[in-house]
Image: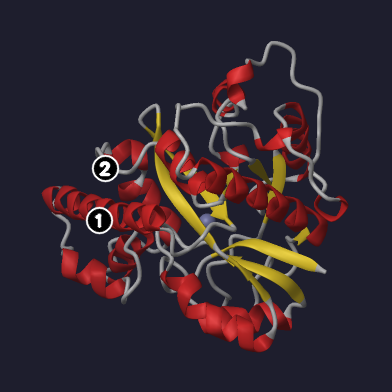
Amino acid sequence: MKADLHTHTTASDGRENPERLVDLALEKGLTSLAITDHDTLDGYQKAKPRADERGIHLITGIENTVLWRGKEVHLLAYFFDADHPEVLQFVARQKRARRLRMEKIVAKLQAQGLDITMDEVLAEAYKGNVGRPHAAAVLIQKRVVATIPEAFVRYLDQQKLQIQTEYASLEEAIHVFHRAGGVLSLAHPGRMFKVPELLDLLEHDFDAIECIHPSHPYHIQKRMKTLAMRFQKLLTGGSDFHKNDENGFHPFFGIVTLSEDHVSQLQARSFEWKSKASTMEGSRVDGTRPSPLASKVGKAGEVHRFPRPAGATASTR
Ligand SMILES: [Zn+2]
């Protein structure tokens, strides 16, 4: 009974189509799967009928790119209502922001004398949501660079590009997905933030930390679990699968997994947000958001209750 809550398909920068990913997940013995393509639900929607037919629990998922202090943060969302109008509107806006950003990236690369066009990048993305790995693929084809990491280091690094993006703010994403019953998890923070920055970030009202991730060696995983306890967050995890190698092998898919106990806890949290949203609907919204931890959760989906960290403000939950 194991789950993978972080995977990508051709709907963003993965190389397997969504239906095929469902089959691969079953081959690996996974019981639950979340497709978390970047800023799109297309992969989830395509995979849903196959997952239902083949009997794997496909959890609604997405990896949102959001802004916090001018920096891009990856925020995973799960168990939300995928037809919720605010979610659909949010995702459509994010997709536009992503495309606009790529247009700016291509213009910057052209200004450096590189032979690359937006059409070529879009062709590389096929019909998926365009991202920097697609630009990297074009640069490899044209022999400007030899590998994706080289493309990132030399041309596509965030710091190097210095591009203003129109992505939603962290706060807005949290608000929209909570209203749709979503559970939010900070993606692979171990490799993204220094500790003081992470401590500030954890004051925000998302629900979980992605502790289990291939980029988190054991000591980082342990540190993330300690922080999750301290800040009363749940745990998520997954392989961040993008593609198999030429031998059909991925070192982490089916290996870096999360137990179903944690999945139940996330689902229980989602029920709390859903019931909160339905009680608030129609009633006066006064700007306060009641804590989901205040309510009782059944045994199967028991929520971790950890002591509040010393000095933490009541407003964090
Ligand atoms: Zn990812």
Residue 259 relative to residue 17: left or right: right
Task: Tell me whether circle 1 and circle 2 mark residues in contact (CB < 8 Å).
Answer: yes
- Amino acid at the residue labelled 2: Glu
Where does the image place residue 214, in percent across and percent down from the top left?
66, 54
How many numbered marks, from 0 up? 2
Residue 283 relative to residue 270: left or right: left
Q: Is residue 76 depicted above or below 22 in this figure?
A: above
Seen at 64% across and 32% down, the residue is 291
Pick whichever, 161 or 193, lies toward us.
193
Where does the image place residue 309, in percent across and percent down from the top left?
74, 19
Could you tell me which secondary element the residue under label 1 belongs to?
helix
- Amino acid at the residue labelled 1: Arg
Where does the image place residue 182, in percent across and percent down from the top left?
56, 51
Where does the image place residue 1, in percent across and percent down from the top left?
83, 69
Could you tell me which secondary element the residue under label 2 belongs to?
loop
Task: Please indicate, yes or no, whether residue 247 appears anywhere in the rendered image.
Answer: no
Residue 237 relative to residue 100: left or right: right
Seen at 12% across and 48% down, the residue is 111
Q: Residue furthest front?
A: 283
Q: Residue furthest bottom?
A: 53
Scheme of image coloration: secondary structure
Q: Residue furthest right?
A: 299
Q: Quadrant of residue 59?
A: bottom right
Pick whichever, 222 or 303, lies toward us.
303
Q: Within 10 angstroms of label 2, few (less than 14), some, or many (20 or more) residues?
A: some
Which label number is shown at residue 166?
2
Q: Is residue 137 depicted above or below 154 in this figure?
A: below
What residue is shown with label 1?
A: 96
Q: Quadrant of residue 200?
A: top right
Distance of label 1 from label 2 (alpha carbons)? 9 Å
